Amino acid sequence: MISFEKRFYDNIREGKITLAFRHWDTLRVLRGKIYRSHNIGLLRIIDVDFKRIQNINMDEMRRCGFETAEEFYADFSLHAETEVDFERDRAVKIEFE
């Protein structure tokens, strides 16, 4: 299962949000698999890989539903399982449809 905040539900259903980043130490979803997302439905994972957080660009942040880098970083920190070092840490990049 992949979970998202309620504020993102409509944009995910409409295909406006197609990317998510998670502060995981391992890949917890697999490319090509279909996962259930509470209150959204089924999501097919198109691609999943690690990416350094400092290399996440503004286009990717917008595809996650954020308008500014500050908003993305604040939300990422809020939902991270451990403290985030934005210069050194990596995130799991999850592209879905």
Image (cartoon, helix red, strand yellow):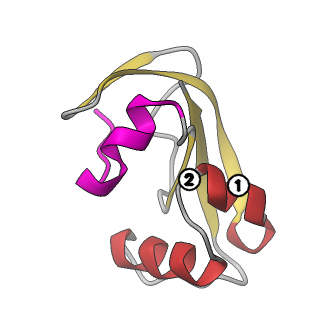
Residue 52: image x %, image y %?
73, 65
The residue carrying mark 2 is 64
Instruction: Examine the rendered structure and indicate whether residue 51 appears above or below residue 87.
Output: above
Locate residue 31: give its quadrant: top right
Q: Tell me which residue sits at (65%, 77%) in the image.
A: 69
- Residue 66, picture quadrant: bottom right
Instruction: Answer with left or right where residue 3 lies relative to residue 64.
Output: left
Residue at 19 percent of width and 33 percent of height:
39
Dot 1 crowding, Cα within 10 Å, few <14, some 14–19, many 20+: some
Residue drawn at (43%, 37%) of the image: 12
- The amino acid marked with disc number 1 is Glu
57 falls in the magenta region = no
Q: Position of residue 96 (x, y in %)?
A: 55, 29
Res. 93 visible in picture = yes
* Extent of the magenta region: 1-15
Q: Is residue 14 above or below residue 60?
A: above
Disc 2, disc 1: CB below 8 Å?
Answer: yes
**Which numbered dot is residue 60?**
1
